[in-house]
Amino acid sequence: MFMARVVGNVEARIRLPGFESQKLLVLQPVDFKGNPIRWTTIALDITGAGVGSLVAYVEGREAANPFEEQSLPVDACVVAIVDEVRYHPPA
């Protein structure tokens, strides 16, 4: 599981079956201090997050788990909106 800041939305006029009502977000992965890391990614959102939200997301097979009944080809999925992070680095 990773953390990211939502930095945009994706509008797609033509979508695969099962994706018609799904929301796509542009995510900027961040470290525990909120600093950007890696490259941006697009993720399917099941939480209702918006631009500026800090979110937790998963990648790979785990990203498709919420959609077992539909078997959607999902590689990244927002699974939580983060309210607070308490990070205490090792001494």
Image: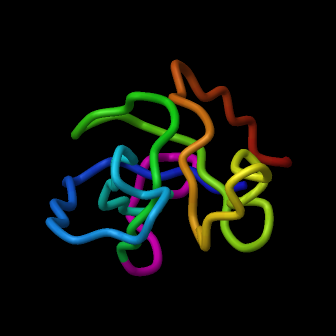
Residue displayed at 66% across by 27% down: 86
- Determine whether, in the image, residue 53 is placed left or right of residue 90: left
Residue 19, quarter of the rendered image: bottom left
Residue displayed at 46% across by 79% down: 38
Residue 75, quarter of the rendered image: bottom right
Q: Quadrant where the N terminus lies? A: bottom right
* Farthest residue, direction bottom: 39
- Classified by dominant secondary structure, the portion drawn in magenta counts as loop
Residue 32: in magenta span: yes
Residue displayed at 51% across by 37% down: 46
Q: Which residues are magenta?
A: 31-39
- Determine whether, in the image, residue 55 is placed left or right of residue 65: left
Q: How is the image coloured?
A: rainbow
Residue 29: in magenta span: no
* Farthest residue, direction right: 91
* Farthest residue, direction top: 83
- Determine whether, in the image, residue 30 is placed left or right of residue 88: left
Query: Residue 5 placed where, x, y %?
Result: 37, 48
Up/down of 10 relative to 3, above or below: below
Residue 61, quarter of the rendered image: bottom right
Up/down of 54 relative to 73, above or below: above
Query: Residue 22 placed where, x, y %?
Result: 39, 47
Pick the front one: 12 or 49 = 12
Query: Residue 87 placed where, x, y %?
Result: 69, 35
Pick the front one: 81 or 33 = 81
Query: Residue 29 placed where, x, y %?
Result: 46, 62
Residue displayed at 60% across by 51% down: 57
Pick the front one: 37 or 11 = 11
